[in-house]
Image: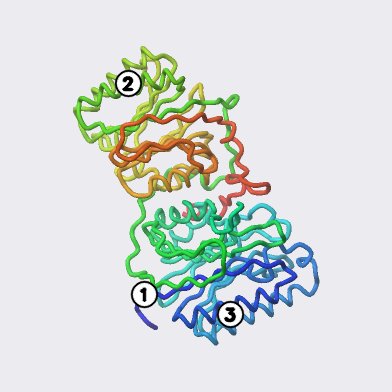
């Protein structure tokens, strides 16, 4: 067995077809495998539901369909042998009298070395597919490989289970949907920010194969099959409109470490729990003051921002994190307490990432420090996941590397947070991480960075940017946040980001 960690991998983007065209779909998939092999690919990734298609409808009830599925699978096994490739393909599999939205990894001998089913069912999946609960890995010459099926990547807990078992590479067999008037410019939340975040937070490579075109004149796919490295960078991608084959050599030699997780905080993740919200949902005006606390002169700018927030009727003002300065911290606290006495009934929240006690945040109102929390991850000393409950709603506090750990914001969502306030470190991926944390938990996100890094933002529960600051500018931004949107956890009919998670599968349950 080869010990090289360099792998030439191909993502085959297929044209979407209706179930009635399933034989053509199969032929095109086999042609794509041959084309990828001709480019020297050692591993080939095909999309979700290559056979017979995604919208099964009455085909799922046909008594001949299980045999059709088995014959298609045999064709893929033969193709792996003929082309000398490892092959990952998605297809409907009939198991114990039920259909699963399946994915298989086949080796060069035609043996199925890994078989999985979709764990996070999407929209109308459950009309014919059974939910699955397996998180196995396959040993290959290049490392350990896991499989995702499309919406699995929306749920951070799914890939987290695979990465904590040691996955080096995750193959994502997808049918990512979209809409728009221009087929050349279609995209999807997973492509825009979720897949880069999944790679980054888990330190793994991700190869995603998608379809392009339209199925059943109603389900449109966005294409954009691509490969993401463990830093979250997109190293190669196809367009949205046409089929194609993407081939890239990747190196699985060095898997970076994830931010260590304090497992003692993870009890809420292994419980089936519906978030409890207090009172009626508020409509909150949020302002964010982006600035660099680089000198004492900045204190006058802080005074101006606090007044501007009050003038603009802000209910909550969040400031960029304080610097690593023992001199600035007491001055900032004294100033903001004094200002909050003058500008009543406005919450002011600020934090320091590198203080004597590690990351720490303060929430003040009307001249009183109401809440103080320590960050829990990176070099944080806190041993709890903070949720601030106030008269205008509940928000979770993230400081520094807390935002890199998906379990923290997921627990805060479970505990009833309607908004996340993240004091972002001067590092990569802030925008992608902020948008993903918002969308995967369906709540508002306020991400405050320093002005020198810039890009501070307020995002909606679907990850859309409501307001964003310039890079390199001291600036205040604002957005109106109706928190009732954070209480609706259905992202599409049939899929609830919290109630449809599978806490019984969480890897911490067995520890």
Rendered position, 374 above or below 29 = above
Label 3 Cα neighbours within 10 Å, binned few <14 / some 14-19 / many ≥20? some
- Is residue 402 visible to the viewer in this orientation of the structure? yes
- Is residue 384 visible to the viewer in this orientation of the structure? no
Distance from Cα at disc 3 to Cα at disc 1: 25 Å
Label drawn at residue 280: none
Image quarter of residue 128: bottom right
Query: In the drawing, does residue 47 fall left or right of residue 260?
Result: right
The N terminus: image quadrant:
bottom left
Judged from the image, the secondary structure of the residue bearing numbered disc 1 is: strand
Give the tally of numbered discs: 3
Q: Is the residue under label 1 in contact with that under label 2 (CB below 8 Å)?
A: no
Label drawn at residue 31: 3
Label drawn at residue 304: 2
Q: Position of residue 427 (x, y in %)?
A: 31, 47
Q: State the residue at coordinates (44%, 16%).
A: 345
Distance from Cα at disc 2 to Cα at disc 1: 55 Å
Q: Viewer-proximal residue, 421 or 243?
A: 243
Judged from the image, the secondary structure of the residue bearing numbered disc 2 is: helix
Q: Position of residue 127 (x, y in %)?
A: 73, 57
Rendered position, 313 above or below 323 = above
Q: Viewer-proximal residue, 401 or 13?
A: 13
Which residue matches tag 1? Answer: 6
Judged from the image, the secondary structure of the residue bearing numbered disc 3 is: helix
Which is nearer the N-term, disc 3 or disc 1? 1
């Amino acid at each position: 067995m080869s010990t090289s960690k360099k792998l030439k991998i191909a993502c085959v983007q297929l044209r979407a077809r209706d179930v009635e065209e399933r034989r053509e779909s199969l032929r095109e998939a086999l042609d794509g495998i041959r084309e990828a092999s001709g480019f020297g690919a050692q591993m080939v990734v095909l999309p979700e539901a290559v056979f017979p298609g995604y919208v099964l409808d009455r085909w799922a009830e046909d008594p001949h369909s299980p045999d059709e599925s088995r014959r298609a699978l045999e064709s893929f096994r033969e193709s792996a042998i003929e082309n000398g490739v490892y092959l990952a393909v998605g297809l409907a599999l009939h198991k114990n009298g039920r259909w699963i939205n399946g994915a298989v990894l086949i080796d060069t001998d035609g043996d199925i070395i890994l078989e999985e089913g979709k764990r996070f069912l999407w929209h109308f999946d459950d009309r014919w597919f059974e939910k699955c609960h397996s998180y196995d890995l396959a040993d290959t010459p290049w490392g350990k490989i896991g499989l995702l099926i499309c919406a699995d990547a929306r749920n951070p807990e799914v890939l987290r289970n695979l990465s904590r078992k040691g996955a080096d590479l995750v193959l994502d067999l997808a049918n990512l949907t979209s809409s728009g008037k221009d087929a050349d410019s279609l995209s999807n939340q997973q492509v825009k920010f979720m897949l880069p975040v999944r790679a980054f937070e888990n330190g793994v490579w991700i190869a995603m194969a998608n379809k392009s075109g339209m199925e059943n004149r109603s389900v449109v796919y966005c294409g954009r099959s691509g490969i993401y490295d463990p830093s979250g960078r997109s190293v190669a991608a196809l367009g949205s409109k046409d089929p194609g084959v993407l081939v890239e050599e990747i190196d699985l030699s060095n898997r970076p470490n994830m931010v260590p997780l304090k497992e003692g905080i993870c009890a809420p993740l292994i419980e089936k729990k519906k978030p409890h919200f207090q009172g009626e949902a508020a409509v909150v005006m949020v302002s964010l003051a982006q600035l660099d606390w680089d000198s004492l002169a900045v204190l006058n700018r802080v005074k101006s921002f606090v007044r501007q927030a009050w003038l603009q009727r802000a209910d909550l003002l969040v400031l960029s994190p304080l610097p690593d300065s023992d001199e600035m911290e007491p001055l900032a606290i004294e100033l903001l307490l004094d200002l909050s006495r003058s500008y009543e009934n406005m919450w002011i929240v600020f934090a320091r990432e590198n203080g004597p006690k590690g990351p720490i945040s303060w929430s003040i109102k009307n001249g009183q420090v109401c809440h103080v929390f320590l960050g829990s991850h990176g070099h944080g000393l806190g041993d709890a996941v903070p949720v601030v409950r106030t008269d205008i709603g509940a928000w979770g506090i993230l400081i520094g590397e807390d935002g890199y750990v998906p379990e923290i914001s997921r627990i805060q969502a479970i505990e009833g947070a309607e908004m996340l306030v993240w004091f972002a470190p001067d590092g990569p991926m802030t925008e992608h991480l902020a948008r993903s944390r918002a969308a995967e938990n369906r709540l508002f996100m306020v991400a405050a960075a320093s002005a020198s890094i810039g890009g501070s933002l307020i995002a909606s529960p679907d990850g859309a940017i409501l307001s964003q600051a310039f890079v390199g500018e001291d600036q205040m931004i604002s957005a109106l946040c109706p928190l009732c949107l954070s209480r609706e956890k259905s992202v599409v009919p049939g899929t609830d980001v919290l109630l449809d998670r599978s806490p019984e599968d969480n890897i911490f349950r067995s520890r």
